[in-house]
Amino acid sequence: MPKGISALEIIFAMFILIVVAFVVIRLFTGVVSPSTLPNIQDFKDTYNYQREKQKCENLCNRFIESNCQDYSAAASYCLQKVAVSIDGNSVTGEKGHYGMVANLPYCEDGLYCFHVSDCVCGSIKLDAKNCLTYLDTYYREVAGFDEDTTKRLICSDTGVKYGSCCPQPTTCNPKQWSIKPKGFDESTYPDIDATHWWVNAGYKRYCTGGGGALSLDCTGGSGTITCNWDNCEITSGEGILTVDTKTHIVNTVRGSYTFSGLSPGVYKAVLSCDNGVEIRGNIIVG
């Protein structure tokens, strides 16, 4: 047999072995036995956490360095997705995959900086709820978009979404998942789905327009601004009314509050409730 043919056969055989080895490696890294899954109690325990946290901290520092005034920096932080693995297979940001962190379900491709990093500037924390306020203000007040365009930007797939996994693990077809979180029991799991953080932060109300119409009216006076609000839903905690650096905790559906001790100038008021965000600008204080 010619030597050239033998060499080709050897090369072909080596190629086949490499392909088989690659397939075996992918099989073991892509499918993990539920009994070997980590019991994730915090996002700090997720795969690739440190690298993504550093990326988020860099974005947060831009916001902090502006003394909490750079809405563009806040928007960049709030919109930044993180690539971590919460289902135990060390593959990050997979569509259609979910995992349990601190006994709560999340879609792996619907995680953001505010999930893995605390961005605190003075009394302001850019969590999911406050990010909605800052994004709305950035698009409307800084970028100059109208209300409809702003809503489409925030609620689009490139905005803030909970991800593409089956939101409710208890109703998912088990065949859709190659792995399940350790200790997960479909028969006893409470009625909580992967949209919980998105709903609690007010995005569902903001994006779908459900519930009553949130309203805010403010008038300026001599060193004061008086704001009246209505239909502020606060089922998940409390609302926040902000004027400049002053804040007022809102815990009633409707009410009124007067900010005092303000210097002459033009101000903006922001009301953040579970059912959305309302902004009133050009409030003149004498």
Image: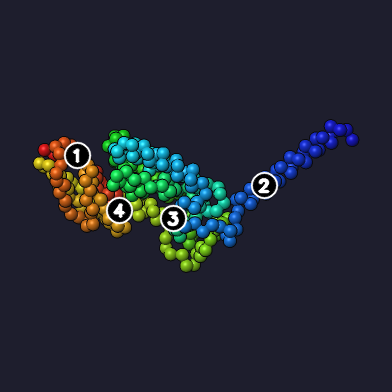
Secondary structure under tag 2 reads helix
Looking at the image, is mark 2 or mark 4 earlier in the sequence? 2
* Quadrant of image for the N terminus: top right
Q: CA distance from mark 3 to mark 1?
A: 38 Å
Secondary structure under tag 3 reads loop
- Res. 194 mark: 3
Foreground: disc 2 or disc 1: 1
Say which residue label 4 marks. 274
Graded by Cα atoms within 10 Å as few (under 14), some (14 to 19) or many (20 or more), the crowding at tag 1 reads: some
Secondary structure under tag 4 reads loop
Counting from the top left corner in percent of width and height, residue 114 is at 39, 47
Q: CA distance from mark 2 to mark 4?
A: 48 Å
Most extreme residue toward the left is 222
Q: Are marks 3 and 2 in contact (CB under 8 Å)?
A: no
Amino acid at the residue labelled 4 = Asp
Graded by Cα atoms within 10 Å as few (under 14), some (14 to 19) or many (20 or more), the crowding at tag 2 reads: few
Left or right of residue 52, residue 284 in this image: left
Say which residue label 1 marks. 267
Q: Splitting the image into 4 quarters, where does residue 146 fall?
A: top left
* Residue 61 shows in the view: yes
Most extreme residue toward the bottom is 188
Foreground: disc 4 or disc 1: 1
Q: CA distance from mark 4 to mark 3?
A: 18 Å
Q: Are marks 4 and 3 in contact (CB under 8 Å)?
A: no
Amino acid at the residue labelled 1 = Tyr
Looking at the image, is mark 4 or mark 3 earlier in the sequence? 3
Graded by Cα atoms within 10 Å as few (under 14), some (14 to 19) or many (20 or more), the crowding at tag 3 reads: many
- Res. 23 mark: 2
Q: CA distance from mark 2 to mark 1?
A: 62 Å
Q: CA distance from mark 4 to mark 1?
A: 24 Å
Residue closer to the observer: 219 or 183:
183
